[in-house]
Image (tube, grey):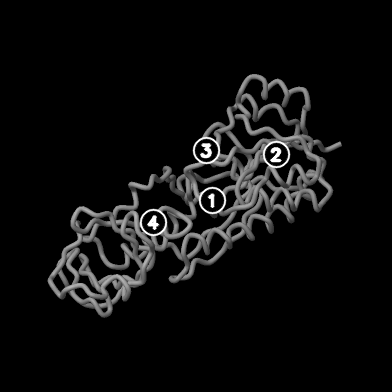
Amino acid sequence: MNKIVVCAYHNVGYRCLEELLRQGAEVRLVFTHEDSPTEEIWFRSVRELAEQHGIPYLTSDINLPANVARLKEIAPDFLLSFYYRNMIRPELLEIPRRGALNLHGSYLPRYRGRVPVNWCVINGETETGATLHYMVEKPDAGDIVDREKVTIGFTDTAFDVFNKVTDAAVTVISRAWPQLLAGTAPRIPMDLKAGNYCGGRKPADGRIDWTKPAVAIYNLVRGVTHPYPGAFTHLDEQKVVIWSAWPVEGTGAPGRIVSTSPLRVGTGEGLLEIRSLQIEGEEELTATEWVEGKTSEIVFFKT
């Protein structure tokens, strides 16, 4: 027997669980999360998938004593985590007879930690991936079983890259699961010195620093645009979210609007052409719609 307990959330959790079920995996229990009322829910529901297949599920933290006891009672062969948001305590990792594994949304050891897709785009990376690895006490540090790379295009948003990483995650699970069952899956030691670790991001981290180069600001914009909270600045004490932009050549004082058609703003290096934006409390507008009827006075965004 190969009993599995799965911890899963988000599209990666949904698609990886779906792939396991397609392969006939014996999933005894699913841990997932309640959706947050403050978060834009644009992804598929793991809970609904479990319900469709008659699999028991819990939305309480796997680390709670009652859930630890339930895991011990099931005595799974594998514990698998796919975008589960709670850190799983070491004592739980020792329960599954054949191992506890996590699917991480980067090409490890690069971008260990939180929100790796957003960080990759913000930092201007040209590739990332999905990695299946054994879980140990240190986050994203256990032996690697399988990885799949994806490219990051210069026009890709974090949403675009997340969809690529989701597909890569399914590819990894489809290859690795039969090997795990057969006991032939590789275990490649993680070289942490070859990678990096990133922390989580808050909406406040989307503040634009106009003294940075236009390309860096562009990467921030596309790294946190829809469905994420967005990159923002302030104009006359009003918060302005920049949803779409493009870096162009030119010069201008950081934060200064140097033209309105097209709408271009000075940065520390080059200009940022704003294509869509949103004043807090108002609807999103194209740059053309926003500047219509405005005077040609020089305006500064706050740096």
Sequence-earlier tag: 2 or 1: 2
The reply to whether residue 250 is visible in this rendering is yes
Q: Are the residues at dot 4 and dot 3 in contact (C-beta closer than 8 Å)? A: no
Q: Nearer the viewer, residue 101 or 34?
A: 34
Say whether marks 2 and 1 touch (CB < 8 Å): no
Residue 60 spot, x, y in % from top left: 62, 30
Left or right, 138 with respect to 58, comes to left
Which of the marked residues, 1 or 3, is nearer the chain's N terminus?
1
At a point 16% along the width and 74% down the height, the residue shown is: 295
- Kindly identify the amino acid type of the residue bearing the numbered disc 2: Val
The residue that appears at 26% across and 65% down in the rendered structure is: 213
According to the picture, the residue beneath numbered tag 1 turns out to be 108
Question: Mark 4 vs mark 3: which is more N-terminal?
Answer: 3
Q: At label 1, which amino acid type do we have?
A: Leu
Q: Residue 6 carries which label?
A: 2
The relative height of residue 89 versus residue 44 in the rendered view (above or below) is above
Residue 133 seen by the camera = no
